[in-house]
Amino acid sequence: MDIELIEIRDFLKQHHPFDLLPKEALEKLPKSIEVRYARRGTVLFEPGEENKFLWVVRTGAVETLDPEGNLLARLSEGECFGVRAILRGGIAVNRCEAIEDSLLYLMPVTEFDRLREAYPQFAFFFSPMGGDRLRSARELAETGGENGMGLMSAKVRDMLKRPPVTTSADVTIQQAAQQMSKEGVSCLLVTDGGKLIGIVTDKDLRNRVVAKGIAYDHPLSEIMTTDPIFIQADDYLFDALLTMSRSNIRHLPIIDNDEVAGVVTTTNIIQKQTTSMVYLVGDIYKRNSIAGLREVVKQVPAMVMNLVDTGASAHNIGHVVSTVTDAIATRLLQLAEEKFGEPPVPYSWIVVGSEARHEQTALSDQDNGLILHDSYDEARHGEYFRNLSKFVSDGLNDCGYIYCPGDVMATNDKWRQPLSQWKKYFAKWIDTPEPEALMLSSVFFDMRSIYGDESLYTNLREFVLKKATGNRIFLSFMAGNALTHQPPLGFFKNFVLIRGGENDHTFDLKHNGVVPIIDLARTYALDAGLSEVNTEDRLKAAVEKKIISQAGANDLLDALEFISITRLRHQARQIRNSQKADNFMPPDDMSHFERNHLKDAFNVVKTMQSALASAYT
Amino acid sequence: MWKRIFGPDLRREWYLLKMPEGPMKQFYRKPIPWPETDYRELEYLCIDLELTGLNPLTDEILSIGFAPIVDQNVILSESAHYLVRPSGDLPENSVVVHGLTDDRLAEAEPLENVLPHVLMALSGRVLLAHHAPIELGFLNVACERLYGYPLLTRAVDTLELEKRNRLQRNQPIDGGVLRLAKARETYNLPRYRAHNALVDAVASGELFLAQAAHKAAKGEKLMLRELMFKNR
């Protein structure tokens, strides 16, 4: 009968993580919702107050601020908040305020818990993960934790913490229930001579015994699930998760050498996954050799695949992967300082390109540089920084971040320079925007300091922004540069494909998909003097500065996310088929739905490119 | 005081005394919401009807959708949607309007089965509709016919409220701005594509929350009287 509330269902379905829910769960969802209207300026909850809902923004916008008043998030249509309060037992940690007139959907916590319990992929979205949580992971690791374990390398066996709780089929239902409550378990494995023959869960006792009014003295065999699905102890944990979500079950017996060894539940898988994410980074800081770091890095491709499969956003994945890369370089720098001693003058290790933008999605080549303090003296300090750069760059290469083909690395004398020299570089690029200068600009304008004296970097950044902001001539060149990569769409909205060669009949999701959006965002950022580096952050900040419209930014953000996640899925598929991951998408590999969405996404990019062209050139 | 003596509240008490048991008496057990109450303290029932025409005496109800507002939240878990079986055949033009066919309505329930659910949900609550005279008129006729008593209730009409607000603020009221979808746009409420009695009921409920939120001054009371529909 819920068909009448189809509007609400369709809205939720369009937004992550509700899109991960199966159809039958989505159908029921609207009936649990309460709808509230909040005028701009209405405080929805304050720290310490009770919050019993997961909130979803239907229209309008909401800000989350920490108790000190720092802005944590600005949430718009389709985004959720109130999660931290729920996870903290219903007491709000942050302050939430409507910053526009907003219509809000409220999902009671009981319903939210039920969904998380039933659908691991949904729960995964809300489990601690992503950038800031990785940062706290680092702190956690520094205070010493248990030994880290890789995400994909984790085996089902690792979940075996206690001997299995088993019984035989001829005990009574009541005896079985008593055993479950004594052992504190939510399911019981039924065995015959060590062999698994059935399983009984809490839910079975509710649905098959109490609800049906079966007497408690009947044998357990009457109500158990016979020949349950199971998993081998040597299978990957990830397979267990997939099996469970595929069959929509929450308990999966583990078999080792034909014998029952235990059971894995959705709850402990999710706990496991997040801790392994956390420890992956934590682990890096405990490794003392390049070989040790390489071990950690090896897990990255599998981690990306796993994140793609569990429905993480491309934005999140980029953040996670870049954070791992940052951590590897940071650790190498620490090791270098141990080896060569304290630096003679302050320096800042900078990264440029996708890592700087927090948009790295795979092991790519390294792009880095060194900003040295102006007290640097080549004769006295040159050797130290040559050694340090070589150590780190070689280490990164050994870990899988291969040398940059364009030689944008701190080992190149040109990119290992005092602050004043860096300023000269940028001044020249901005004042005489020649083709090479523009190419270097688009690389070096996406820059971030990851280690050392950050003030060197911020000083440079302020200088650059001041020089570029509002500089019409330079901006018009940048805009022209941003138009060099076009979305692969023909005049009649059909895909324009690469012809001939190795990548015949494909299109390039990177250069014709993601890069045009990155270029647009960079141009807006330079125009408005924005210090943001991440493309999403840049677009959002550009809206604040009224460089682009909210609608235009939203469209671009959606397009970016869709193209990026399509690219990641394509790569995950290739890795799974033991192929080399690339950016070349054959349209035939996509569903009708994906094709249409991709066309829409490309169309957005095209529209924004023409707007840029008319505004700047 | 005069209004109180001859108003619906006293008549309700009189009906309670003489009325036989049944859905209508159930409805009258709870007092009719008192106008001098802060609107936030009251509960509402957003209702929308789909009809064969606009005359309560000759036209029929085809479907009823409703959802309550409690604590300023539209509670969808208590919402409902009923298809009503008309006594006669459908005139052709309303089929076109609502996409309801004789076939689908054959599965519907007669009004006497549906009306008790509506009355139970409405009891003690303020009736809320966009262009409330329609809902008030049709439900009143239905009550008279089925139970022999009129439906005494207080109502909020989001259309009339929007008109009043706009006139007060010297804003124009032409160009369809009072229509549900247009009025909602003014308050940054989403556009709903589907149209059925429940979606429209929820839509009018959301509109009311927005209208009231914009009218109410922070921390000050706003009485139902100021928002209420005054037709009698």
Image (cartoon, rainbow, N blue to C red):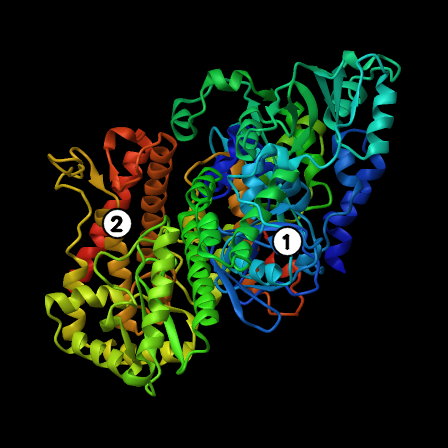
Q: Is residue B77 above or below residue A425?
A: above
Q: In this orientation, does residue B228 appear?
A: no
Judge from the rendering whether residue A508 lies leftward or rightward of residue A490; answer left or right: right
| Mark linked to residue B72 | 1
Q: Nearer the viewer, residue A485 or A446?
A: A446
> x%, y% of residue B191?
42, 46
Q: Residues within 10 Å of mark 2 (few under 14, many from 20)?
A: many
Q: Is residue A545 above or below residue A318?
A: below
Question: Percent x, y for residue A68?
Answer: 60, 73
Q: From the viewer's side, name the closer residue of B36 and A47.
A: A47
Res B43 visible:
yes
> In the image, what residue type sits under mark 2?
Val
Looking at the image, which is closer to me, A578 or A511? Answer: A578
- The residue that mark 2 highlights is A604
The quarter of the image holding the N terminus of chain A is: top right
Residue A370 spot, x, y in % from top left: 33, 72
Q: Is residue A433 above or below residue A289?
A: below
* Element class at badge 2: helix
Closest to the observer: A276 or B119?
A276
Kindly indicate whether the residues beneath marks 2 and 1 are on one polypeptide chain: no
Q: Position of residue A3 (x, y in %)?
A: 51, 30
